[in-house]
């Protein structure tokens, strides 16, 4: 049975400027989940800890929350949930203020993006769909502790995560595989193969997914035109945007926008 927690706020791929920090003395009657796409320092269980890109942390209700991104722009996914979050955590034996590194950081962002869209659209069963995605995230977090040889410990994975973070932070740029490979100091063929092995997706498809996820949110939450959404997501050619949007979602951006407009909260 899916635990249907209530979400107070949710954001995917949220950006803050370099040096941004959170310092809450008490977060109140809620749990806060954060998936960091860039490195931060956090105060967890009475000590300062460095969190690598891809790390996930849950803060407990009525406890303080502190983290800072001193060296780079902060990019993170997050949600605030009601106290029933503890039931799902217990199901997967997850701990508050412990850092988890799911093997596929991109999948966590994708799931948070889907949750954000569901919360905005509020279509039928949006609470159930959101809860199912949160359960997936928690299952991936729990699975990370079961992996005998977690690939995220390798230096090469660390380097590729840094490249992925830089590329996705600047998703408006039309990145070529060659440019990405140069950031990792690898040949194009080697970079492509290692990237796909680590993240389970090609670098170009991964970037495309990030752009389309942002477009979905723009079309859903702001009601902007298809042409404007394409521009804001880095597409110079509107028809190329429409083609990629349909490949990723199964529908055109125009139809996606109309479907949302027709849904009343």
Image: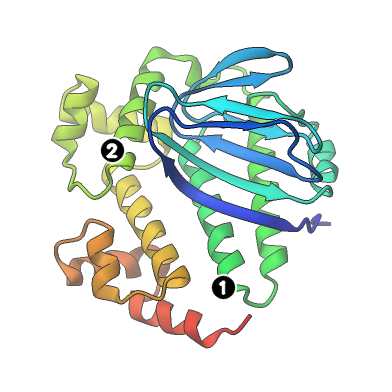
- Residue 89 placed where, x, y %? 79, 38
Here the colouring is rainbow
Residue at x 31%, y 47% (from the top left corner): 207
Helix, strand or loop status at disc 1: helix
Question: Dot 1 corresponds to which residue?
Answer: 121
Who is closer to the viewer here, 80 or 256? 80
Q: Is residue 263 left or right of residue 139?
A: left
Q: Residue at x 48, y 83 (%)?
A: 261
Q: Quarter of the image for the C terminus: give it.
A: bottom right
**Left or right: 33, with 223 as reference point:** right
Quadrant of the rendered image containing residue 199: top left
Give the percent coordinates (x, y) of residue 210. Answer: 37, 51
Q: Give residue 55's quadrant in the image.
A: top right
Figure quadrant of residue 240? bottom left
Q: Position of residue 85 (x, y in %)?
A: 79, 46
Instruction: Tell me the element at label 2.
Output: helix
In the shown orientation, is residue 34 left or right of residue 32?
A: left
Whether pointer 1 and pointer 2 mark residues with C-beta atoms closer than 8 Å, the reply is no
Q: Tell me, yes or no, if residue 1 can be seen here.
A: yes
Q: What whole-number distance in Å separates the C-alpha atoms at marks 1 and 2?
A: 29 Å
Q: Earlier in the sequence, mark 1 or mark 2?
A: 1
Residue at numbered disc 2: 167
Foreground: 169 or 105?
169
Q: Callout 1 environment at 10 Å: few (<14), some (14 to 19), or many (20+)? A: many
Q: Quadrant of the N terminus?
A: bottom right
As rendered, which of 135 and 250 lies closer to the eye?
135
Question: Within 10 Å of the Cα at label 2, are there few (<14), some (14-19), or many (20+) other Cα atoms?
Answer: many
How many numbered marks are there?
A: 2
Is residue 242 shown to the viewer in this render? no
Give the residue drawn at x 51%, y 25%: 68
Establish if 167 lies above or below 117. Answer: above
């Amino acid at each position: 049975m899916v635990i249907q927690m209530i979400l107070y706020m949710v954001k995917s791929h949220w950006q803050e400027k370099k040096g941004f920090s959170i310092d809450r003395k008490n977060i109140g009657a809620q749990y806060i989940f954060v998936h960091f796409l860039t490195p931060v320092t956090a105060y967890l269980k009475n000590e300062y800890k460095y969190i690598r890109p891809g790390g996930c942390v849950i803060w407990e209700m009525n406890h303080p929350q502190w983290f800072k991104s001193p060296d780079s722009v902060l990019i993170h996914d997050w949600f605030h949930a009601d106290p029933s979050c503890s039931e799902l955590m217990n199901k997967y034996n997850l701990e508050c203020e412990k850092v988890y590194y799911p093997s596929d950081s991109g999948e966590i962002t994708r799931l948070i993006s889907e949750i954000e869209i569901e919360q905005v659209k509020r279509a039928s069963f949006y609470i159930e769909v959101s809860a199912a995605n949160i359960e997936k995230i928690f299952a991936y977090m729990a699975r990370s502790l079961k992996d005998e040889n977690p690939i995220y410990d390798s230096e090469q994975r660390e380097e590729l995560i840094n490249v992925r973070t830089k590329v996705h932070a600047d998703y408006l740029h039309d990145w070529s595989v060659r440019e990405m490979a140069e950031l990792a100091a690898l040949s194009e063929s080697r970079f492509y193969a290692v990237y796909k092995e680590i993240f389970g997706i090609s670098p170009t498809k991964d970037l495309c997914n990030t752009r389309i996820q942002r477009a979905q949110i723009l079309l859903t939450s702001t009601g902007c035109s298809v042409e404007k959404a394409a521009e804001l997501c880095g597409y110079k050619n509107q028809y190329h945007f429409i083609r990629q949007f349909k490949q990723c979602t199964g529908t055109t951006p125009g139809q996606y926008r109309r479907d949302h407009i027709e849904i009343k909260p």
